[in-house]
Structure formats: structure tokens, C-alpha cells
Image (cartoon, rainbow, N blue to C red):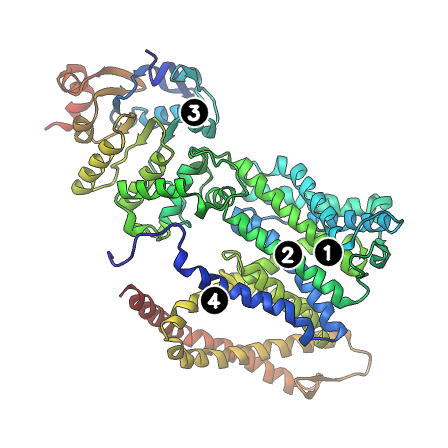
Amino acid sequence: MTAAIELVDLRKSFGSTEIIRGVNLEVGEGERHAVIGPNGAGKSTLYNLITAKYVPTAGRIRLRGQDITARKPYEINRMGLSRSFQVTNIFPRMSVFENVRCGALWAMNYRYSFWQDVDRLDDVNERSLQILNDIGMVPRADVPAGVLSYAEQRALEIGITIAGGANVVLLDEPTAGMNRSETDQTVELVRRITENKTLIMVEHDMSVVFGLADRISVLVYGEIIASGPPDEIRGNPAVREAYLGAEAD
Amino acid sequence: MSAIAPTSPRTGGTFLRRNAIWWVALLFVLLLPQVARSGTSIAVLNQMCIMVIFSLSYNMLLGQGGMLSFGHAVYFGLGGYFTIHLMKMASGGFFMPLPLVPLAGGLAGLLFGLLFGSFSTNRAGTVFAMISLGIGEMIAASSLIFVKFSGGEEGITADRTDLTSLFGIRFRSEVDVYYLIAAWMVLSAWLMYRFSRTPVGRMANAVRDNPERAEFVGYSQKHVRLLSFMGAGFFAGIAGGLFAVNYEIVTEETVNLVSSGTVLLQAYIGGVGFFAGPIVGAIVYTLLQTLLSNYTEIWAFYVGLIFVATVMYAPTGLTGIIMMHLPIYRAGKLRSLALPYLRIGVPALCCTIGVIGLLELLHFLSVRAVGQSTKRLFWLTLNVEQPFAWIIFSVLAVGGFLVARRVAPSVLAAWEAASLHAFGGRAR
């Protein structure tokens, strides 16, 4: 069985500083996988490598066996990988409904059509409405996305991410900056929308991932020091020392 | 909150109402030459219609695609040149009805859009703007270098009445030409509107708002921009073709940077955030240019002032100002703004008169003949060598400005109150 995502000896240097120092990781089809690590461990860099924002210095990235190293973002997206952004990344001057619809157009084969009226693409509009329903934003459909609250924008961001129906979803700290109840809601949302999908999420907040992830990898100083089910990670002494020790009091 | 119904993608309820204004506009287009019959007014209308297409095409770049171009006249001018060459060739006898020749301009615009767009649409922002400026300068210079094609300073001329007549119409009269141009305008505007509602048109907005995100929903920002760019080139070429049909001459002036600047001004004054904005801008600009130039030689200076004022005080353009008042009008609260607007309108008018007076006097000083000391302005005869007129205009300008600035906050507050009321009323 080929893995949904496979990282092979992945490395990234900025100048003479090596931030990612040989990461090997396999995420199986349908698995919810979390990458955690203390600040400065290289989580965001790793995320940006997988999603083609950065070009790796060495190593390979494979999506279902296909090499995607140094592919363009839109190509990777067309191959079935979708991502969210840590800094909220939406289309601020378009309505909430249109934001989600943009996420669905390519995947539903409308591509560069300049002869069809978007308002008449019933399948796209139905899907978009369905997504809005999933993320609980139907009442806000006509609002310009730029005026939404922070938590709403984060939810919309997830909506755009899943609208194309990608099988591999990457989320970058989906609960960053949220209060307790918003976090709980978001975790519930992520759980729901990633049913039967492969999820890779980068997260700083440990409590978020322990309830959600099937497996957890711990990244410290650009290397994965442990990888396994949540209980195993919680009991791992190296992890405790590197990460939990700093926070547990 | 829950009172707002879930959005229906087709928004069918407002369909008729939303289109009503376009039907009225169409009626206007059809009837105007019957009302404004004089040769000059038809000439103004023709120019206006051409500029409407040109400005709308420009807004495919700026308003919808987020591309600030300083060289859009390239596609307008090249469209004009190709059309006029076709007209010249066709007057030799082969079948080519005049109504179709602007298509040659459109195709030229499309192909040059593909050529220049293929390397300038990788990024928006400064890089795109600079490349567009470079291409604009390059093509303008070329039009004076490749004389065989461009006719040098004299340009290329043709006679539209030499072409194959269609249903007996030879387009000898200006009114015939008006209807030809108007038909192209309506068709082009409709097509450009339709384009904005297609998947690529929507993604043009998405790429404008956030290219990085657009790439991660599967779209190449470059390809989306390039398609908009080619569309904009096509319609600019159509406008240029109509220019050739209308004036029967195409010179370097159609392709140069002044022309590129004009279309930017038009679109911006009208409002780039709205589809109809460039239409309003083209109409207002053409009126300013043709009417104002009857009264003053420094009309272009005033247009510049209006542009600066728009950028500073009304960045959403004239259409934006109208749209700001639409909900207030619907709520029936427009009357509550009459007094506040009068309060700022009077000093603003004084300031305007003062500024105009000073500018006209200054201009007169610099161009007057020796010994000439009086100028007629605002139905008055003013002596520029006496301080009286200068003092009056200075007081009006400075005083009007200060008073207007002083009352501006209260007027803004009145507008906010009215619009808050309007939105509150709608939510209920």
C-alpha cells in the first residue's frame, strides 16, 4: 500500500542554517496525523515544504507515490492535496459564498471556462452551499469575507480548503488564536470534515491533537524524535523532556 | 441574524430589478441621437461610446484582475491600426462590410495581449505596472519608427464609405456610424459583464484578492491573469477598431502613453470597484473633455484636479458615491442629508470657484497678448493688473476650503447616521 504522503530524508536550509534536518515520515491513507513541536522546531517550514511554498534543499516528497517535490502549488492541488494557511488566507472582497465556490470550481472541472455563467453551475453552487452548511456559515453567505470575525474567517478558510474535495488535507494550526470554546468547535469541525480523508495538521496546542489525531509526530530542531499513537507519545520520555517538560507543571 | 435567508445562488428575485437599469440605459442609447441631433453632439456620443468600451476593457485588468496597467492604449491603438489597414485593403473591392472590421482590431488586441501578457502576467503589482509602462513606451516609439505600418506622424487614413455596403447602408452619416458604434458598445459591455460572471471571471477576482490562495484551489495565477489580459486586449482592440471607423484616421496618439493615462483616469474617476464604474467614468470624462474645452483651454488641468480629488476623497469613484447613497435612498432617508450636504456644498462651491478663478487668471497672465489686461470670467470682466479679483478669488478658495473642512466631520456623521438607519431598517 502506498502512503498518502511520504517524506524521504527531507532537508531545508536557509543560508547556512539547516532548519529541517532529514525528516522521514509516512502518513497512511485515511489517517489523521498531527505534527507537533515546540516553537522554532521547524513545523511551519515543514508544512511549507509539503505545500510547495518552499523548495527543499534535498529529499523527496511523494503524494500517493507520485513525486511532487518542487511542483507548483496549483499542480499539487490538482493532484488532490489541499491546504489551509496559518495566517488567515481568504478572498476578502468576495462574499463568503463566493470564497467557497472558488475552492470548488477547478475540482469540479470548470477550470478556465469563460463561457459558462457561474450562477447557473448548479452542481458547484449546491456543493458550495453544502460546505457552508458544514462549516455553519449559511447565514453569513452574502457577507464580504473581509468583515468576518477572526474565528469565522478561520472556519471559512477550512471551508475553502475542503471545497475542492481533496483527499489529502493539510491544516496549519487551525485553532491558533482561538479561545477554548472556539477551539472545541473547530476540532469538532475538523473531525467531521476529514472523515475518510487523510489529514496532516501542524499544531502547537497539544490538547487539540491528542483527541483528534490517530498518530502524532514530534518535531524538535528539525528532526522527528518520535512518531506513534497519542498514548505512546504521551508516555515517551524523550518527548517529555523535549516538549512536554517545558509545559507540564 | 437568522432573518437573513440563506443565499440562493441564482438570486432570482432581484433579476428583473437588477436588469431594469440596463434596459433604461439601452433605451437611452437608442434614443439619444434623436434628441441630440447636431453634428457635434453625435460626434461626442460616438467618442463616448468608444471610450466606454475602452474603459470597461481596462477595468478587466484593474478592477477585476488587480493589474495596474500604464500601457493599455497599446491594444487600443494596434486595434485601430489593423482595422484601418483592413479598411484600406477592403476599399480595393473585396467583400468586407464595415460593421465587421472592428473585429480585426479585436483580434489584433487579443493576439498582442497573448504576446505581451505571456511574460508580464506572472505577477501583479509593481512588476506588472512597470512592464506595462515599458511595453507602452516601446509600442508608442515603434509607431514613429515603423512608418510603413503606422504612417508616421500623419498616421493612416481610410474612407469607410468605400467598403461593401450592407443592406444599402454606406455609413456616410454620423448617425449611421453612431448606431454601429453603439451596437458594438452594447454587445461588448454585455460580453464583458458575462465574462465577469464565468469561472475565470470569478477567479480573476480571487487572484486579485489573494493569488497565493487561488493557487491552492487549483488555479495558476498567471493563467487566470493572462486570460483576463487577453480579454482586455480584445475589447480594447474593438474600441480601437471603432475609433478607426469613426475618425477614418489612426495616428500615434491612439497608442501613446497619454492615451493609456486617459483610460486609467476614466476608469478610476468612474470607480474601478463596480462593473458600471468605467461607463460612468468614460461618459463624464468625454463630457469634460468636449464641453469643458469649449470654455477653457486648461480643461486637462481640471481633469487632473478631479482625478487627484477622487483618489484622495472618493477612492471608490463616482459610482462608489452613488452606491453609498443607494441604501439610504431605499430607506427613504435621503432627505435627511439635504441640509448637511447644503452645509458643505456651499463652501465647497465657493472653494471651487475661487480655485478656478485663480487658475484662469494665472493662465491668462501667461498667455495674454501685450497690453491686454482684462479677462472675461464668470460673466464678469476682470482686470488682472488690479489686486481686486485676485483677493476675492483667494478669499473664496481659502475660506471655502477652511469652512468645508470644518463642517466635514458633521456631514460625515450625518451620512453615517442615515446609512446606519438604512441598514438597520433592512435587517428588520
Q: Do the residues bearing badges 3 and 2 touch, measured as CB atoms within 8 Å?
A: no
Q: Which residue is mark 1?
A: B242
Q: Do the residues bearing badges 2 and 1 touch, measured as CB atoms within 8 Å?
A: yes
Label placed on residue B321: 4
Q: Is residue A134 visible?
A: yes
| Mark 3 closeness class: few <14, some 14–19, many ≥20 residues within 10 Å | some
Residue at left 29%, top 26%? A197
**Alpha-carbon span between mark 2 and mark 1:** 10 Å
Badge nearest the viewer, 1 or 4: 1
Residue type indicated by callout 4: Ile
| Mark 1 closeness class: few <14, some 14–19, many ≥20 residues within 10 Å | many
User: Residue A207 falls in which quadrant of the image?
Assistant: top left
Q: Are marks 4 and 3 on the same chain?
A: no
Tell me if B140 is positioned left or right of A246 in this view.
Answer: right
Q: Earlier in the sequence, mark 1 or mark 4?
A: 1
Q: Which residue is mark 2?
A: B53
Badge nearest the viewer, 4 or 2: 2
**Alpha-carbon span between mark 1 and mark 3:** 45 Å
Q: Secondary structure at mark 1?
A: helix
**Alpha-carbon span between mark 1 and mark 4:** 31 Å
**Alpha-carbon span between mark 4 and mark 3:** 45 Å
When the figure is inspected, residue A163 is found, relative to residue A59, above or below; the finding is below
State which chain disc 2 sits on.
Answer: B
Q: Secondary structure at mark 4?
A: helix
The residue positioned farthest toward the left in the image shown: A249
Q: Are marks 3 and 2 on the same chain?
A: no
